[in-house]
Image (cartoon, grey):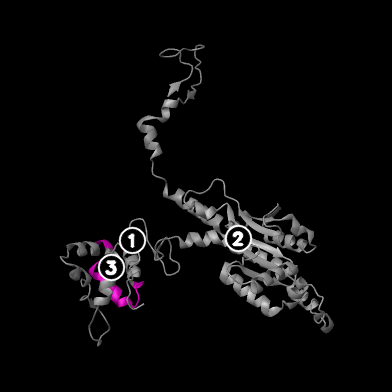
Amino acid sequence: MARAGSGRAGGSRRGRGQRRPPTWEISDSDTEGPAGAEAATRVRDPAEELREAAEVLRRLRPEQAVRRLVVLMDPAILEDAGADILMEALDALGCEYRVEPQRPARSLRWSRVKPDPCPLSVPPELWAVDEQDVLLLLEPEEFLQGVVQLTQIRGPTCSVPWITPESPACLHLAVIGLEAYLWSRQPSTQETRQPGCPAVAQAEVAVGWPEVEEALVLLQLWANVDVLLVATWQELSQHVCAFTRALAQRPFKQSRESGAFSFCTAGRWAAGEQVKRDGTGLRGAWWRQIRQFNRVSAAVADAVVAAFPSPRLLQQAYVACGTEQERLALLADLPVKMGEGVRLRRVGPDLSRRICLFLTTTNPDLLLDLGS
């Protein structure tokens, strides 16, 4: 620290009985040294961490996250009069939409607005800037042309329509009014018998619901593409809003599922066990972890936890064993307390083996339960 206005040691007065108000300037060196390092490594206040976690959860909740989704709409969609219904539905949902050119044309894409500042406690992948899902709107004629290509042109040279191999997007198709279009295209007897009918028209006439259903199966199996068949723009708008809400819930669900151990949570929910900072509740979490094994009752978990109150103590016991067989059978003879008049039971070799492998194996693909 350096005091401003002190030309030499002791400073000077500007008048008798009057002192210059002390003002202070921070030099660059004040943030260096042990004091600065100590401040930089200072432990954060637990209350501050809780407030930040609560704010993160608030931002991730669907009602808040839907406001961070933007529906990007191709201008070609606005050429249809029913597009007003879609935009009114998005307004009612509280989701922003923008009209921007998209590839392919007549498609919808979703973009997620990254919060500023982005919470450090949330993995960056939860705030993906752009979603990979694309909804492509097709006219009935265009969709039926693709149906002909899928159902009549078989073999390895047949490519799936509307899909470019280099595109990483997850494609969804939507066709409005296909059923009404097929009914209107049903030919009369005289038209079907005319020999001079063009090949394209004959192929278009030959397409009916059996061919459409076959094409839907092929699209699902070959390209993992689902097709939405709706009668009106109202139905399409309902689907787009439902899909938007699902995308808004995705980060919240991923944040809840990203916990490595669902049985050890910050609060009591979904059969979770509350664990405090002083370690209270860890034994209950260990008991619930034992219960997650197949065919393990509460009494059996009580027996294991009573003998080894923590997984660390059980691991130390495994290290002390001389042979692999001794480790696998370490818990087999532990008595299990049952009700009065019930024959004494033991943990058994199967569960003993599974718990041993669970705590000692280095193979992530090892099958613990041979009975599954």
Q: Residue at x 49, y 14 (%)?
A: 17
Q: CA distance from mark 1 to mark 3?
A: 27 Å
Mark 3 or mark 2: which is in front?
Answer: 2
Which residue lies under the disc numbered 3?
357
Q: CA distance from mark 3 to mark 2?
A: 41 Å
Q: Position of residue 9 (x, y in %)?
A: 40, 13
Q: Quadrant of residue 193?
A: bottom right
Q: Does label 3 or label 2 sit earlier along the sequence?
A: 2
Q: Which residue is more in the foreground, 292 or 228? A: 228
Which quadrant is home to the C terminus? Answer: bottom left
Quick check: 161 left or right of 290? right
Q: Position of residue 83 (x, y in %)?
A: 76, 61
Residue type indicated by callout 1: Thr
**Which stretch did the figure color magenta?**
291-312
Q: Residue furthest left?
A: 322
Residue type indicated by callout 3: Leu
Residue contact between numbered discs 3 and 2, judged by CB atoms under 8 Å: no
Secondary structure of the residue carrying tag 1 is loop
Secondary structure of the residue carrying tag 2 is strand
Residue type indicated by callout 2: Asp
Q: Does label 1 or label 2 sit earlier along the sequence?
A: 2
Q: Residue furthest bottom?
A: 341
**Residue 201 within the magenta-colored segment of the rendering:** no
**Residue 303 within the magenta-colored segment of the rendering:** yes
Q: Residue at x 57, y 69 (%)?
A: 222
Q: Residue at x 63, y 57 (%)?
A: 110
Q: Within 10 Å of the Cα at label 2, are there few (<14), some (14-19), or many (20+) other Cα atoms?
A: some
Secondary structure of the residue carrying tag 3 is helix
Which residue lies under the disc numbered 1?
280
Q: Quadrant of residue 320?
A: bottom left
